[in-house]
Image (cartoon, rainbow, N blue to C red):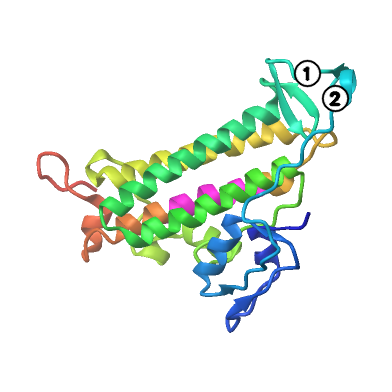
Amino acid sequence: MRVVTQAELRSMLLPAACKEYTPPSGAFVTPEARDYLISRGIELKKDPEAPETMPVEPIPMRGKRTYVDAETGEFYAEKPEHMTHLRGNLLVPKTHRRIAFRGAIDSLEADVLEAALLAAEQGEEETRKGLGEILRCLKDVMSAEVGETPLEAPQLFGLSAGELRRQTHDVKSAFGIDHPNPDYTMGPLAVRLNTLRTRVRSAELLAVKTFCPRGEYPRDDIILTLNRLSSAVYWLFCRYISRQSPETGKAEGLEDHKGNRRG
């Protein structure tokens, strides 16, 4: 069955003037792809024949050969409890590095949701929207890894990868502040964004361990995307700090717990 993902829509480079999108007949449009269309102000023309939920293809029962150990080729009639699905009827131990990576992305999505909730509670709508883009990108990473499909390089906050890199390396020029040194006095949301940045970086390092060395299952696209995401979270952090006061000095230093100026 045809599935339309957010990554596919991004790769189509829909023009700014596009007002509606008609998916292929009978295709399932993922929730992330629908969110992307909404964010662009594009109406999704629904196909009455298309499924509303992602269909799950049943695994054919083949007796003792129903499941296959992806590493040894051994067959199983039933799925052992210590194993899980790598893809289809291919099983691996739950400690397999790719399963561990999927767990890390799942945890990272939960971290992003918590940060987005905090941003919403504080009325930081722009930060919440930015975190929404990061969450959708993480879902694309998960989908591409599980489905073993190509992952398009993300374009976040309307910035190219090169511009995002430039702004996070030249914070003074982009936001009017020096590189901020994280501190608890910056407040709960800033601290949460800084924590999220470190967790994205940890997921990137796990991706390197999971998909290298080359040859077995190289996924440079996933590694590249996570590298971009760590920069994206830092970009949100810097923008948030720079907007805490119209005075750049306060954004750079803030006050300590005794009311003294730092920086």
Instruction: Look at the image and say whether residue 233 sits in the magenta stretch.
Output: yes
Q: Is residue 34 left or right of residue 240?
A: right
Q: Position of residue 48 (x, y in %)?
A: 66, 66
Q: CA distance from mark 2 to mark 1?
A: 7 Å
Q: Residue at x 51, y 52 (%)?
A: 134
Instruction: Look at the image and say whether residue 160 sits in the magenta stretch.
Output: no
Quarter where residue 256 is shown? top left
- The amino acid type found where label 1 is placed reads Glu
Q: Is residue 166 left or right of residue 182?
A: right
Say which residue label 2 marks. Answer: 66
- Quarter of the picture containing the N terminus is bottom right
Circles 2, 1 touching at the beta carbon (< 8 Å): yes
Q: Residue at x 62, y 73 (%)?
A: 45
Q: Tell me the crowding category of disc 2: few under 14, some 14 to 19, or many 20 or more residues within 10 angstroms, Cα based.
A: some
Q: Position of residue 248 (x, y in %)?
A: 25, 62
Q: Residue at x 35, y 42 (%)?
A: 192
Say which residue label 1 marks. Answer: 78
Q: Position of residue 110 (x, y in %)?
A: 46, 39
- The amino acid type found where label 2 is placed reads Thr
Q: Main secondary structure of the magenta part?
A: helix
- First in sequence, mark 2 or 1: give its number: 2
Q: Is residue 115 above or below residue 130?
A: above
Q: Which residues are magenta?
A: 224-235
- Looking at this view, is 89 or 55 the one in front? 55
Q: Under tag 1, what secondary structure?
A: loop
- Looking at this view, is 86 or 138 the one in front? 86
Q: Residue at x 84, y 28 (%)?
A: 61
Using the rendered image of the protein, determine whether residue 155 is visible from the camera's viewpoint.
no
Q: Under tag 2, what secondary structure?
A: loop
